[in-house]
Amino acid sequence: MMLVFRSILSKSKATSTGLLLRATIANNSYHSFSRCYSQHNFSFSEPRAPSRAESRVPTSRSFCTSSERDSIEYDVVIVGAGPAGLSAAIRLKQMCRERNADLSVCVLEKGAEVGAHILSGNVFEPRALNELIPQWKEQEAPITTPVSSDKFWFLTKGRAISLPSPFNNKGNYVISLSQLIRWMGAKAEELGVEIYPGFAASEILFDANNKVIGIGTNDMGISKDGSKKENFQRGVEIKGRITLLAEGCRGSLSEKIMKKYNLREKGGAEHQTYALGIKEVWEIDEEKHQPGAVIHTLGWPLDHKTYGGSFLYHMKDNLVSIGLVVALNYQNPFMSPYEEFQKLKHHPAIKPILEGGTVIQYGARTLNEGGFQSIPYPVFPGGAIIGCSAGFMNVPKIKGTHTAMKSGMLAAEVTFSALNEGVDMDTYWDALRNSWIWEELRKSRNYRPAFEYGLIPGLALSGLEHYIFKGRHSFTLKHGKPDHEATNAAQLHSPIHYPKADGVLSFDVPTSLHRSNTNHEHDQPPHLRLRDPKIPEVLNLPVYAAPESRYCPARVYEYVADEHNQMKLQINAQNCLHCKACDIKDPKQNIEWTVPEGGGGPGYSVM
């Protein structure tokens, strides 16, 4: 049988799970397990140290120890329990049943539980899920609110002007993606997938031939000064014959792999472009609630040079999700996406919906907007990049879950064939290009770059693209500067004075941060690292007026006076929402986002 960990609900449980994992490794380190081809039944269990007689270890994985750290070997290691990673895991195990084979599949998730780090709009297109689990309705997937209306507004400061909706959301559903991912995690475990929440993959493992052979988790129980605490635990090597990276947008390991193997150049891809999405879930008055109602907007509160827009979706149970998406190639360093979001909620077309309601949860996450032009070659020696780590979001649809899931399914099918039939993993690239993902993204390739010319020209060009050309022409527009290069010097702009939060519709950052359930161990090495510690004081502050203090939606970065009254950058890493905006937007790419101790970060439940 298989060792299965149930989703853990707190940092303390993450620690106990880590102890259990290490105890299991220690108890079984002298065993060598041969690969067999039989099916197993799996169940949930509370984390506890099993006795040797009842230790539930699959026969197709092996344990070993070295003087450095313990290691576990699997057939397939997947980093990230999101839409792509879980779809890949499920499809692999489905194929094992279909072909009477057995592959050991492990999914590592840095969140304290599956779904804890998942944030999305989300108007869900079930196309990929229909293929993966056709009986999802009968199996009680948390997808129960079909889109009932679909509005598109152009906002001015005082008006909402209705425009024809280009989104075609008929047949789609308003959902909580974090809840759907929890359901998918349970389905994966039922099939025999091992999921380890609370374990952060911090490094790639290579063999002597520069081939990826797995990942290493970070050490836990290290203090800020680098010394080992009493609860120190050495990281574990999780080795796989194939490694699939499904970390989501701007995955830290995926970025390293793309650079090491020049995957953007190999795929002929442009740089990736990004946006920051900031979201709240509200509980509103029942008489105002319209289940399935969908509203998207362009225009105010953003200026006409900044691409972005807002969304308001009526979920089930009197819940409404509202958010603002801001492209990170904005020019004005004084702009704060968080404060722009607070302004949005006071618009006369939006305020009446929220009045009298209560905020349930807050969060933020970056998303890919590069589309077709920015897809890298997704295969590297020993594995592949899937989902939003590669970047398959359909920008005009404002959807990436279905494409992420499909990419994971395609990668799983190629991985199965590679391990059982000797097929080359490079056929994943061919599978992508022959799939409906490629067709979707190619047709929509010119929407996002059209807005490089401003809001009004962008609307005109995208309108032609949607209603006339429909992606059938031969030309392809290019993206502008990388997002970090788009920020102007502060002297070219005037400071923006944002209104004070009223505590009713708009809120200060600490209040919002509390609603995200974010938690990190305070006494640990900072996971937000400066490549050059001098740059904030000698460049970011005097030239760009400290943009990191504004683009971060969690007030991680702030400048404070030292004992000599000199302004110095202070990094409040414990506030981090794992949105990755800093890794993208810093003008000199001086901030490197790395994984903190496993289990740290936000604790989303309805996002």
Image (cartoon, grey):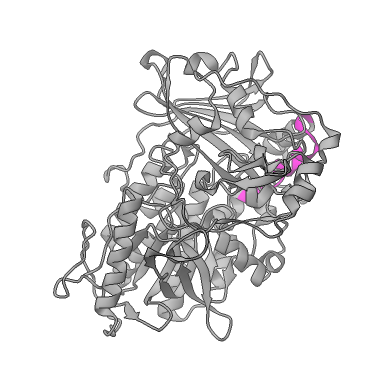
> Quick check: 420 above or below 3?
below
Q: Residue at x 52, y 51 (%)?
A: 403
Residue 30 falls in image quadrant: bottom left
Q: Residue at x 41, y 38 (%)?
A: 176
Residue 370 visible (yes or no): no
Q: Quadrant of the C terminus?
A: top left
Q: Nearer the viewer, residue 432 or 449?
A: 449
Magenta span of residues: 441-456
Q: Residue at x 62, y 46 (%)?
A: 570
State left or right for residue 43 relative to residue 428: left
Picture coordinates of residue 13 (x, y %)?
Answer: 30, 54
Q: Quadrant of the N terminus?
A: bottom left
Q: Nearer the viewer, residue 423 or 587?
A: 587
Q: Nearer the viewer, residue 173 or 79?
A: 79
State left or right for residue 10 relative to residue 404: left
Tell which residue pokes out farthest to the right in this image: 492
Q: Residue at x 67, y 46 (%)?
A: 569
Picture coordinates of residue 215 (x, y %)?
Answer: 47, 71
Residue 182 visible (yes or no): yes
> Quick check: 151 above or below 65?
above
Q: Is residue 454 magenta?
A: yes
Q: Nearer the viewer, residue 72 or 35?
A: 72
Q: Is residue 525 magenta?
A: no
Tell which residue pokes out farthest to the left in this image: 53
